[in-house]
Amino acid sequence: MMNSKLPDLEYRPAILLIAFNRPDFFKARILTLEKLTKNSSQIYIAIDGPRSGNKKDTLAINEILAILESSPLYASVKLIKSNRNKGCDDHIVESIDEVLKTHNSLIVIEDDVSLSNSGINRLLEMTQKVANEGRINPIVTMSGLSRKGWIGKNSWRQSLYFSAWGFGINRDFWKLHCLDKNISNSTELQVKLEKSKNWKKISKRKQMLWLERMSRINYDYSIQRTIFLENLQTFAPIFRIADNVGHESVGATHTRHKKPKFLQHSVSGINDDFDIHPVNCASLNRFLIWIDSQTWAGDGYLSIRGRNIGIRSSIKGVLRPTKVNR
């Protein structure tokens, strides 16, 4: 329940835009934020510092700052600017930490993630709804389905998976996540995972694949780890509402490869009309989670990512102690 003594601002999801060295992407995201209607959310801009000795980074960051200063949003945004390069994972995690000191929830949009202004509003609304209900489920914008087809409206439904390509979380989830990151003992990790019904739902092959992924320092895999550990589900749309425009970009951290087929069609503004009722059909939810597995979650046999783990890698993933994202 909300504490009436605290300012209303704390209970409106903040918007956190992550930037580094891609002025063209940043400008596109700022233009979308400028068009937001009925928006009372505080906007934060987090800009990572330049890599040591990299003059191109410094020039790009200066260009980003110039774009921001020329925007009508400039007077109202809060800037989180690093003087040194923290790297994608530490920069995003520390920026989330900073925003959640003041706000009960937030949505995170990296500069290469494109949502329409109505898509951002839908993500804000669902993030607010989850927080108001006292739930801690993350909200994502991803789906393996891009087009509505004959279905009139989009709808939120459950998934087992997390995607960093536009998401919403609240303070209660983040506190739990920070505690779970301290679990570095492989035995302790395995014991807690075995208590998770959702973890036991996936096959041994998928478990080995996820153990290897979760041993990395990537912040999105770290969040997925908490989702498994705490037996949580995410809320995802039936039809994707975000585009990732960073594929094959030289400045990309995780998307330098070619764009997957399921992401080929732009969905900007197409799937943003949502039914007020979430999907309650268990069989439909199971089918959509299977689609997630074969596409963006990448642990199904139809996904190249889901087939590229060998026996030796699997064994190493199980036996190797889990790294902690510090």
Image (cartoon, rainbow, N blue to C red):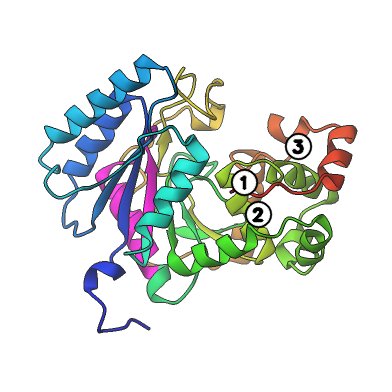
Q: Residue at x 66, y 45 (%)?
A: 293
Q: Which mark is residue 26?
A: none
Q: Residue at x 52, y 41 (%)?
A: 89
- Residue linked to disc 1: 221
For residue 216, above or below residue 131: above
Residue 318 point in image, percent of width and height: 84, 47
Taking depth in this image into account, of 285 and 227 the one nearest to the observer is 227
Quarter residue 58 falls in? top left
Residue 285 point in image, percent of width and height: 60, 59
Tell me the amino acid under the disc marked 2: Arg
| Quarter occupied by the N terminus | bottom left
- Residue linked to disc 3: 301
Residue 289 point in image, percent of width and height: 63, 52
Residue 209 point in image, percent of width and height: 77, 42
Q: Residue at x 79, y 61 (%)?
A: 200
Residue span colored magenta? 106-129
